[in-house]
Amino acid sequence: AQRVTQPEKLLSVFKGAPVELKCNYSYSGSPELFWYVQYSRQRLQLLLRHISRESIKGFTADLNKGETSFHLKKPFAQEEDSAMYYCALSGDGGSNYKLTFGKGTLLTVNP
Amino acid sequence: GAVVSQHPSWVICKSGTSVKIECRSLDFQATTMFWYRQFPKQSLMLMATSNEGSKATYEQGVEKDKFLINHASLTLSTLTVTSAHPEDSSFYICSALDPNEQFFGPGTRLTVL
């Protein structure tokens, strides 16, 4: 069975501070990992996926297979980063496209 | 980017009635769509995978006869909650695959009285 764990329900930081949202996963095969973001009153949207190795809106995430983690990081948080963040996993290297979501972390960036 | 719509955005119905929710891909064709359910302050849980022209694939624990899914065209999938009861009240979200990324609809809030 595949599982995604986001240990923090809430995370509050000040503007300009570094932020790290934690994500750990459990999957026996080759997973593809994603971060999705949901801004207030908006729909869920893809932030980044590990295979693309991109930096989106200053966020990065590295897949650590040894620690089965995919933490999301940003060196300097901005107020507009305040949102709900979901880590998600797709099994079989992403070929089946089915997503298992973590419970989400609500990030608040204070001025 | 690809746009997915859902209709209605919210619905209130009486216990025992059926409710249909539509999911449309507006600017692309989607052979595969997904239906999720989200309880308050909880994560999205995949209910089923909807494939155009074939039967939906349901996740373990999801009642096929209660949550009927039809994907009759490349731009439309429907979820019908049959004989709805208060415990079916939830937020239902669909997504459409284009071509290897899921684009999400805005969700439908169902309240069963």
Image: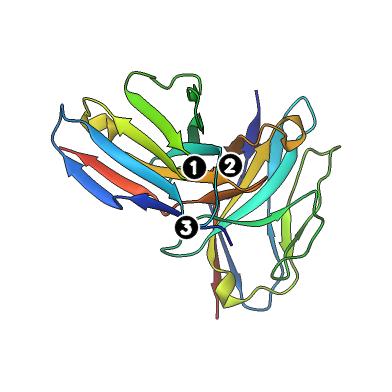
Name the kind of residue labelled 1 in the image.
Ser
Residue B63 in the image, given as x and y percentages of width and height: 38, 19
Rendered-image quadrant of the C terminus of chain A: bottom right
Which numbered dot is residue A102? Answer: 2
Q: Do labels 1 and 2 touch, CB within 8 Å? A: yes
Which numbered dot is residue B17? Answer: none
Residue B94 in the image, given as x and y percentages of width and height: 45, 43
As drawn, A106 above or below B39: below
Q: Chain of mark 2?
A: A
Seen from the viewer's position, the closer of residues B18 and B84 is B18
Seen from the viewer's position, the closer of residues A69 and B67 is B67
Question: Which comes sooner in the sequence, label 3 or label 2?
Answer: 3
Residue behind mark 3: A43
As drawn, B22 above or below A14: above
Label 3 and label 2: CA atoms lie apart by 17 Å
Label 1 and label 2: CA atoms lie apart by 6 Å
Q: Is residue A53 left or right of residue A83?
A: right
For label 1, count other residues whose C-alpha is less than 10 Å away and answer few (under 14), some (14-19) or many (20+). some
Q: Chain of mark 3?
A: A
- Residue at 39%, 19% (x, y): give it: B64
SS of the residue under disc 1: loop
- Nearer the observer: mark 1 or 3; the answer is 3
Residue behind mark 1: B43
Q: Chain of mark 1?
A: B
